[in-house]
Amino acid sequence: MLGLPLVGFLSDKLGRKTTTILTGVLGGIFGILRSFSLWYWFFIAMEFLEAFIGDICSPIYVLSLEMVSSKKRLPFNMLVSLGYPFGGVALGLVAWLSPNWRWTLRILYTPALLFIFYKFCLKESPRWLLSNGKKDKAIDILEEAAECNKIKLDRSMLERISFPENENASFRETLKHTLSSSKLRTRFFVCVVWWMTCTFVNYGLVINSVSLEGNRYMNFILTQLVELPGIFIITYVLIHCKRKKPLILSFLAGGMLCVVHPFIPKDLTWASTTVYMFSKLMSSFYFSITYLYTSELFPTYSRNSMHALCSSLGRTGSILAQQTPLLMIYWKGLPAIVFGSASLIAGLLTLLVPDVAQDSLPDNVSQAEALGKTKGKTALKEK
């Protein structure tokens, strides 16, 4: 929650690639150091530092988003998202096979040190380079990409590319300029609610899965595996149905499934587990859409900062999710009712934002405000 604004700001200032390498390697180092802890305070300190500066997800996601065209955005997003369920399954298996927590941490975090090699494997985002006045480097990357795809580009044409450069503004000034627009302020509020709901429900369902009947490790693994088909399904849906309707429907469907779950008879274990997993599937749907949707609603120079800020404030949901098992003291089905209510509210608030899909990523506030309008009206306004 505290580190995401910092990581987002570093990504917008130092670059997506540099921040990706920095956070990835530091996350691995703090995780490994935690495994050697002899004191509880040191364990907690390393846990905090890893979360504070070791979150690679935000900068690498924005980098991958800015490196592809709008037509390829969804399929590429699907491919990179496959790592999440496989990582979750690996976590469950490692914890199951290695009950010693020290070795579990070492096995999980040592591969993160390999992120140092991203220095040679990744290219910086041309959009970020252009917005920061590094036009020559951006053109070199575009020419290399064109060569890989066997496309011939005219260097003189690339030299004529115009792009609004990002001034050396502070994080506060960047946010102030972005949120000076009433439309973007509304989107920011809705995005924060999305993120709070996503983290609250998604992590809450995972945490409470170990309370289901059966092997707790297997139940945890199932909550991760259910996301695998979900990635392919939601990608297909988004290609054909844009963003807004799928997000609303997944929020509402997930909410209703959560509300229904406590009232399933206890002797129908298979039905209870099935409804629970479908609830988790819906939460993975709207989490995936939220991650992508948030990045598409704000301009380039503040995209990572806004994405990180929304995600940061949304971590209130993940903090609260860890407390939901305590609600079972009053009624075993109370956590599911709370999850369902949150999902229904988030679904209704989605009506306040524009739909985007084939729109190019906005580079400034005026372009961001024009999102969701018909091409004819947008073109007329630009003329």
Image: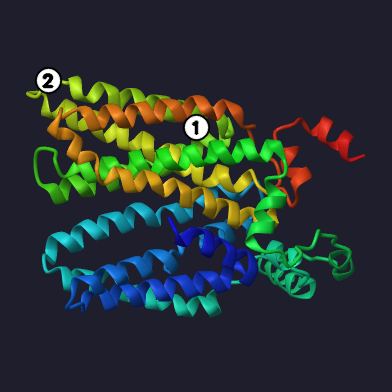
Residue at image point 50% right, 46% down: 291
Mark 2–mark 1 Cα distance, whole angstroms, equals 30 Å
Left/right of residue 18 with respect to residue 113 in the rendered view:
right
First along the sequence among labels 2 and 1: 1
Decide if residue 172 is in sight here. yes
Residue at image point 37% right, 68% down: 50
Secondary element under disc 1, as helix, strand or loop, is helix
Q: How is the image coloured?
A: rainbow
Depicted 245 relative to depicted 212: above or below:
above
Depicted 118 relative to depicted 82: above or below:
below
Q: Position of residue 105 (x, y in %)?
A: 23, 70
Q: Nearer the viewer, residue 134 or 238?
A: 134
Q: Nearer the viewer, residue 352 or 159?
A: 352
Q: Position of residue 304 (x, y in %)?
A: 59, 57
Amino acid found under the numbered disc labelled 2: Pro
Rendered-image quadrant of the N terminus: bottom left
Secondary element under disc 2, as helix, strand or loop, is loop
Amino acid found under the numbered disc labelled 1: Leu
Residue at image point 18% right, 75% down: 39
* Residue under pointer 1: 247
* Residue under pointer 2: 265
Rendered-image quadrant of the C terminus: top right
Depicted 281 relative to depicted 334: above or below:
below
Decide if residue 78 is in sight here. no
Residue at image point 47% right, 56% down: 80
